[in-house]
Each structure stands twice: as structure tokens, then as C-alpha cells.
Image (cartoon, grey):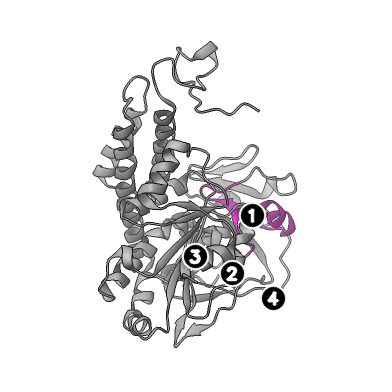
Amino acid sequence: MQEFRMFCYQCSQTAGGRGCTASGVCGKLPTVARLQDNLLFVIKGISAYLNHARELGRTDPEIGHFLADAFYSTLTNVNFDAQRFVSFSLEAGRMTLRVMRLLKDAHIAAYGEPTPVEVFTGTRKGRAVIVTGHSMKALEELLKQTEGSAINIYTHSEMLAAHGYPGLRRYSHLVGNLGGAWFDQRELFSRYPAAIVGTSNCLMPPREAYRDRMFTTGVTGLPGVTHIRDFDFGPVMERVARLPELEESSGSVRRVTGFGKSSVLALADRIGSLVQQGRIRRFFLVGGCDSPTRRNEYFRRFVQQLPDDTIVLTLGCGKYRINDLELGEIEGVPRLMDLGQCNDSIVAIEIAQALAQALGTGLEELPLSLILMWMEQKAVAIFWALLSLGFRNIRLGPILPAWVNEDILRVLSAEYGVRLISDPEKDLNEILGR
């Protein structure tokens, strides 16, 4: 199989009329092509967060200006300078931080700041709608329109975080969360005779078993599936009325979510004291974008081997690898705290900054290790946001993103200490210095 150093087919000069794979006919070098691709991935992530913020009436002209400049820079015969694109990716990291703060502020203004809550994982007797994706606005509108209708609403995957918001869980018919990460949806949606609403990314083409009871909204779309415009969920309610009721069942796992910034920082003095006493040795952020591969079993094995004097923060759908584990507490501090969606990565960053301040240290000296799952393009935005803040020694897996060639990997390794995960025990021993 031929290994492509690059692939570009965006203009009429492409080699053989098919695409440039060694270097560009125009003079574009492979590393520049990959950096351009990388920048486009980051732009997609920023656009996703900005889309959800705009749903809640928030926008930011500076982010819009950056998106225009960044898109333009990838056009044919505009920019051939690799260093300029490195500067653009780091600037994209700062814009990612800005747009994530914008979205988080919008969520808190609309629904209050998340607080910890245990979420029911079984089913209540009655007709049901399952909501998947990331859009809190879409869920809110559905809850409003189904209130008093005897329809139960369940979340799936990244929508688990909705239960942490006081303004959303006040709806008594938001009853629980079904399933785990995004890739279980085809089996899950086939099993439960419920209507399904896809609100954002992380959708899969539906099986015929549930295609006629699935709906999309916002920017999403699936072939042969009814699309909901302007949050008018009347067609969903009509379809639910013709479905059978779900039977009562108890949940098989315990999931707790809703550890917002204030909830965690309320423990800051106690955490600081426990760190000083040596009762808390290290913090680990384990999460990100999960994928249906056996290699992602690494993350569960890693957390299972952590010593009792460590704290685990998690977010993104990667949390489903570990959020059923009972890790207990350290003198009232939970050892496993779910901070929410991938959209909530800003919460983890702000908690790390606050803890560093409380401990009188910089981020680089904070006893914190980042063990992140790589899956899709939107995650690249968060990755560059972390690098722009100076986070180092990030472990990433189960594989390196395909856009990372030798030149890019050399910079990421030398400048930022980025490395690929290996064996859980080996990695843990290196981190803990034992």
C-alpha cells in the first residue's frame, strides 16, 4: 500500500488531474499541506462550539474574524510558510479557549452552573424520546414542548452532562441517561422503542429498525430521516404517540455527573491541604473522544491501576470508559469527577489554573497528567488549546492522528513532550517515577 506524504486536490494543477501526494505541483510542501489540514480541523471544532453558543444568543466578532483569516490562508496559492501555519494553529488554540468560555458562560446563564448529581440509568414506564449529540438548547426546547405530556426524556452519550444543570433537571420528565459513548447508538436505538433526536455531531447512519422514528435538528442530517427546523418538535411528539411504552427497569450502572467549576473549587482549600500533607499525590485528566476499538481499553486499565492517593477528572464521551468505576473519596474529595462534555474542556482548564494558583505553582509544576483519547477532528481544537496554554507531556492515544507526519511529531515531542500511550502500567510508573 502506497504511503501518501500529503494529499491535495483543491486546484486544477493537481498531479495527473487526481491529486498531489508527494509534494504540490504549485510548490506546496507536505508539511504545509498537513498543517493546512490541521488548521481546518481546528476551525471545525471552533465552529461547532460557536454554533452552540449562537443557539443561546451569544457570539464574538473576534472569533468570526479569526475564522475568516484562517479559512482564507488555506486557499490555493495563498500561504506556503510552515511557520506561519504553526502560528495559526497556536492562535487557533487561543480562539478555542475563547469560544469554549463563550459557550460555557451561555450555558450557565441559561441553565445555572452544574452541580453533582447521580443520574438514573434505567427506564420508567411510559413513552420516550432519547436525545443524543451536544445541544443543550435543543434539549431545553424539547423539554418545554413535552412538559405535561407524559413523555419521558432520556439523554444519551455526551448529553449526560445535561443532568448537571439545575435549569434542565428541574423538568421532572428528564428522567435518565441510556447507553454510553456515541458508537453504541445503533444497537441502543434498535433496542428501545423510543423516538430519537440527534442534535449535533457524533451521529451514525441509522439502521432500518429505527430510521422512521429518528429525527435530526440543527446542522445534522441523515438520509431518509425527518429534519426538525426551528426547534419545532411537533413531528417527534406525533411519532411518539404511535410508539409502545417502555417498561420499568432498574439501572445497571451508577453514573455521577455535574462537577462544575464552583463545585470543584469549593473543595480547593481541602484539596490544597491534602496535597501539602501528601494525601493527594497527583491529579489525572482521563477523557476525550472515545472510539470502538479494543486499544481504548487502555484507559480503563490505566485508571483501575491508579493508587488511592490520586484524583481523576474526566470529560467527553471517553468518560464512559471509566465513569462506572467506584473509586471512593479522599477525606470528602471524590476520586472521580465528571466535568461534562468535550465542550466543557474549559472547565478542566480553569480548575487546573485555579489549583495551580491555590498551590502557589505554575501549570507546568502542577501535579497533573493529561491522558487523552483521540478520535475526531473537533478534538484537535482542544488539543491546540492545551498546547497554547503551555501544558506539556500530554499522552495521546490509542494512535497518533494521521495528520501528524514526522516533521510535526518532531516539534510536538521536542517542544511540548507529546507522546503516544503505551502500556498502562509502564506509563503510570513513568508518571509516578517509580
Q: In terms of depth relative to the viewer, which is nearer, 403 or 194?
A: 403
Image coords of residue 117 (percent x, y):
50, 76
Name the residue at 37% across, 81% down: 275
The residue that disc 3 covers is: 430
Q: Residues within 10 Å of mark 1 (few under 14, many from 20)?
A: few
Magenta residues, start to end: 176-203
The residue that disc 2 covers is: 176
Image coords of residue 35 (percent x, y):
40, 34
Q: Tell me the mark number nearer the camera, choosing from 4 and 3.
A: 3
Q: Tell me the mark number nearer the camera, choosing from 2 and 3.
A: 3
State which tag comes first along the sequence, 4 or 3. Answer: 4
89 lies above or below 374 = above
State which tag comes first along the sequence, 1 or 2. Answer: 2
Name the residue at 38% across, 18% down: 27
Residue type (three-letter) at the residue carrying disc 2: Gly
Residue type (three-letter) at the residue carrying disc 4: Ser
State yes or no: discs 1 and 3 in contact (Cβ < 8 Å). no
Name the residue at 32% across, 29% down: 73
Q: Residues within 10 Å of mark 4 (few under 14, many from 20)?
A: few
State yes or no: discs 1 and 2 in contact (Cβ < 8 Å). no
Q: CA distance from mark 1 to mark 3?
A: 20 Å
Q: In terms of depth relative to the viewer, which is nearer, 376 or 164?
A: 376
Name the residue at 33% across, 25% down: 80
| Magenta stretch encompasses residue 295 | no
Element carrying mark 3: helix
Residue type (three-letter) at the residue carrying disc 3: Glu
